Image: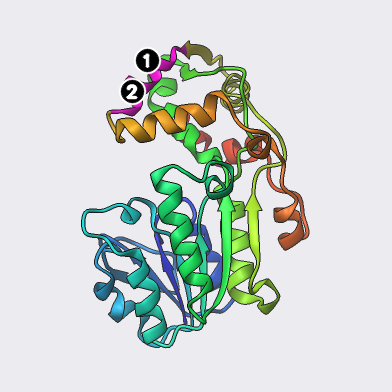
Amino acid sequence: MIVVTGATGNIGRPLTRALTEAGQQVTAVSRHTTAVPDGARHVAADLAEPAGLRPALAGAKSLFLLLSGDLHATGASPADIIGEAAAAGVRRVVLLSTLGVVTRPFGPTRIAMRALEDMLRESGLDWTILRPGGFASNALWWADSVRARQVVAAPFGDVGVPLVDPADIAAVAAACLLEDRHTGGVYELTGPEVISPRRQAEVIATALGSPVRFHELTRDEAKAAMAQSMPAELADDTLEILGSPSPAELRVSPDVQRVLGRAPRPFADWVARNVDAFR
């Protein structure tokens, strides 16, 4: 059995589907009770309380670990999840980390994630680490304004990074959970091209078949908007990446191709599959 955490999100849902379609028994874990892809078992658990994962981990051999906000929840001890997995007999863990642990290693989020990577390496379990860059699905931040006003508002309109499709992350994760050859691998996951917010707006407009205007926010305007949903420190950190990506953050990685035997999907593919969110 394979346990998938974050199972109802942009990565976990297609991963769960891919594993069930491959004939695997899957336990899909999320914080709240919800529908999961056919063939999967659902367990509600809060990753900020690792002991609560025990019912999900019972009998499991592999774990996909996606922490998201649980990495920094008050009183959270993500390292205990690895201990719980090992105690339950799990032999393989695929960890969703972030490219930032190597490109910007000194932010609080990356320090915590790098510590978790190091613990996984030292755990005695088989492991694979996935380090994606920016997600194509972050464009959903604009869905409301596109539906209401046909506007994409973002800072740094002509500065881009190679956004990765979450479905590609899921496909790579599935391969790493199913194939022994990926044990000990560290994969940096990006899209096939650097794409700016202005260009993303053009792609969305093409998919909709109607105009979408791009409005460039100042850094202060963007920070004020972001601070409504994240700590100010994290907003500053994110804006630094968006406005001044390093050479490593601009690099198109070969790792999706290396694992899947095909090129990563471009942003336009993600938009085509999710265009209804912008209508």
Q: Is residue 39 above or below residue 130?
A: below
Majority secondary structure in the magenta region = helix
Mark 1: secondary structure:
helix
Q: Position of residue 49 (x, y in %)?
A: 24, 67
- Callout 2: few (<14), some (14-19), or many (20+) C-alpha neighbours within 10 Å? some
Q: Is residue 46 visible?
A: yes
**What separation in Å lies between label 1 and label 2 (alpha carbons)?**
6 Å
Cβ atoms under marks 1 and 2 closer than 8 Å = yes
Colouring chosen for the image of the structure = rainbow
Q: Nearer the viewer, residue 76 or 194?
A: 76
Q: Residue at x 44, y 21 (%)?
A: 146
Q: Nearer the viewer, residue 153 or 218?
A: 218
Q: Residue at x 59, y 40 (%)?
A: 270
Q: Position of residue 221 (x, y in %)?
A: 37, 15
State which region is magenta: 217-227
Q: Is residue 92 above or below residue 74?
A: below
Q: Position of residue 118 (x, y in %)?
A: 50, 65
> Would you name the residue on which mark 2 appears?
225
Labelled disc at residue 221: 1
Q: What is the three-letter code of the residue carrying label 2?
A: Ala
Asked if residue 162 lies in the magenta stretch, the reply is: no
Mark 2: secondary structure:
helix
Q: Is residue 41 visible?
A: no
Q: Position of residue 115 (x, y in %)?
A: 44, 60
Q: Is residue 55 left or right of residue 214?
A: left
Q: Is residue 49 above or below residue 180?
A: above
